[in-house]
Amino acid sequence: MILGIGSIALDTTRTPFRTVERALGGAATFFSISASHFTDVSVMGAIGGDFPAEHLALLHKMGVDTRGVQKLPGKTMFFDSEFSYDMYARKVHATELNVYLDYAPKSPDSLKSPDYLYLGTLEPDKQLSVLRQCSGRPKFVLMDTIEFYIETQRDKLHKTISEVDGMLLNDIEARMLCKESNLFKCAKQIHGWGPELVVIKKGENGSILFKDDIVLPLPAFPLADAVDPTGAGDSFAGGFFGHVARSGGKLDEKTLKQAIAYGTVMGAFAIEDFGVRRLTTISKKDIEARYSKYKQLLSL
Amino acid sequence: MILGIGSIALDTTRTPFRTVERALGGAATFFSISASHFTDVSVMGAIGGDFPAEHLALLHKMGVDTRGVQKLPGKTMFFDSEFSYDMYARKVHATELNVYLDYAPKSPDSLKSPDYLYLGTLEPDKQLSVLRQCSGRPKFVLMDTIEFYIETQRDKLHKTISEVDGMLLNDIEARMLCKESNLFKCAKQIHGWGPELVVIKKGENGSILFKDDIVLPLPAFPLADAVDPTGAGDSFAGGFFGHVARSGGKLDEKTLKQAIAYGTVMGAFAIEDFGVRRLTTISKKDIEARYSKYKQLLSL
């Protein structure tokens, strides 16, 4: 079982073509729904009194265990952003943390021994507290972070990084974290801090994975248009970690390559519609079909 | 036979680790030496009285036909640039066009019926004049350009683009040329102007090829360090077009994919040493070994 923690939010997303208000969003949401196509997944996070019952029902429908979701007095985290015509640049209108601000993660007993732990976007010391609440060491602990915590909580972030097995972050975050533009050197630095696995996501330019002597660059799945780029990275993480988990935690080159490919495929599905919609309507057959297409594309 | 035209220059390249002065460089040089590993290649361009005999001898040693190189009164084009520690950003200290400024390409009779024509970096109307001097239409005409001509000679550039079969350019050039950030839309625009083939080079992020319904994104060959990034794009072009030529000009998905892979491999060799040095010391066996490694890397 994978336990994933991170933000659960209501997203208002504006594009030149359409605006969708207060849709189900957040890093932990995208991650867990994506991973649910691969393995058992439980989610931890905080919601407020305004969180629509239908959103919880959707998570349940996807088989996501929500016993770790804490309902707190106040409002659910709210994120309002706008994409311009190029669908790259995002302008943030509002980030209201609300209940997420004072959220103190408490793992219920049923979630204290996850096989795999995903520490999504969250304050570094809270990420660490979730790891510390595990009764035994999970087989693999993967973490993400965002620019905000790199800028404001670098020391705490380093402490958390030193205790995990893998780090998954985007190229801007990697360069900012390591103060280094060469991604190979960024990965080497992060390895030096502890994590044996480093996956750097590069959006439309794919990703690059580093572990021991393994260096795996893979392209993004080619899509002419993004309907809504929100959640692509978290969906990538769900596909990646989901495949690692269902493969029994194997970290050989073949398994890692397939995991990156499944992450790539899930990221591509995520951006084809607003919010989590596409991720909740695809079948295992759709995933396998796109995986096969990607595999064929890369076959020389 | 491929005929390639473009700059032939003397390059002074400065890096934090070493400076190499007045080495053999220029787009046509990198292109032709790279392509020489795949097929017969002739080069056109201009040199001055100061062009060292040893540089011509090196081209001959590589099997490059230099009957189209015009020796003009004056000095050879000179390019002086510096890379900082990150080996990405390049600071240009001097671009002295010298004899290249008033160069009027004249194809000798022996080069008037190339099977394949590569129009490298050159003023757009001069690129066109080389095509017009061909006695018959080449099987395939591929062109490149640079930011300078996009900025200063857009109309002439459009005229040349409308007469070629393929365009190969980097992502910055594509976005600038098309005034559009989405590379899929850039390719669509360029297709609309004439070229059936568009290859967009993305440096460390690989490349993406567009032709009819074919969209091929492939990553760069993973290299931790670049010794000298100069000429990587032209070497990519030489490997790409060289493979297309030796495959009889086939443009099916399989051949194009292999051509991109060979371009990727040649670009990776180019940056492993200063100037053209690495390209002139590798064997066919080295190229095949790296191609196999790349193929294995992408095999899911």
Image (cartoon, coloured by chain):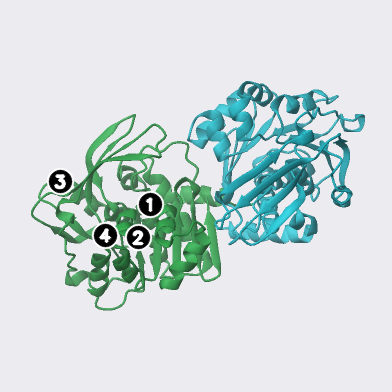
Chain colours: A green, B cyan
- Disc 3 designates what residue? A52
The N terminus of chain B lies in quadrant: top right
**Secondary structure beneath disc 1?**
helix
Mark 2 or 1, which is nearer the eye?
2
**Secondary structure beneath disc 2?**
loop
| Foreground residue among B113 and A249 | B113
| Foreground residue among A90 and B82 | B82
Residue A1 visible, this orientation = no
- Disc 1 designates what residue? A233
| Foreground residue among A205 and A152 | A152
Check disc 4 and give the amino acid type: Leu
- Which residue ends up furthest to the left in the rendered image? A73
- Disc 4 designates what residue? A122
Q: Does the CB distance between marks 2 and 1 fall below 8 Å?
A: yes
The C terminus of chain B lies in quadrant: bottom right
The answer for which chain carries disc 1 is A
Using the rendered image, report if marks 2 and 3 lie on a common chain.
yes
Check disc 2 and give the amino acid type: Asp
Check disc 1 and give the amino acid type: Gly
Please report whichever mark, 1 or 4, sits nearer to the chain's N-terminal start: 4
Q: CA distance from mark 2 to mark 1?
A: 10 Å
Q: CA distance from mark 1 to mark 3?
A: 24 Å
Q: CA distance from mark 2 to mark 3?
A: 27 Å
**Secondary structure beneath disc 3?**
loop
- Disc 2 designates what residue? A144
Q: CA distance from mark 4 to mark 2?
A: 9 Å
Where is residue A190, by image quadrant? bottom left
Please report whichever mark, 2 or 3, sits nearer to the chain's N-terminal start: 3
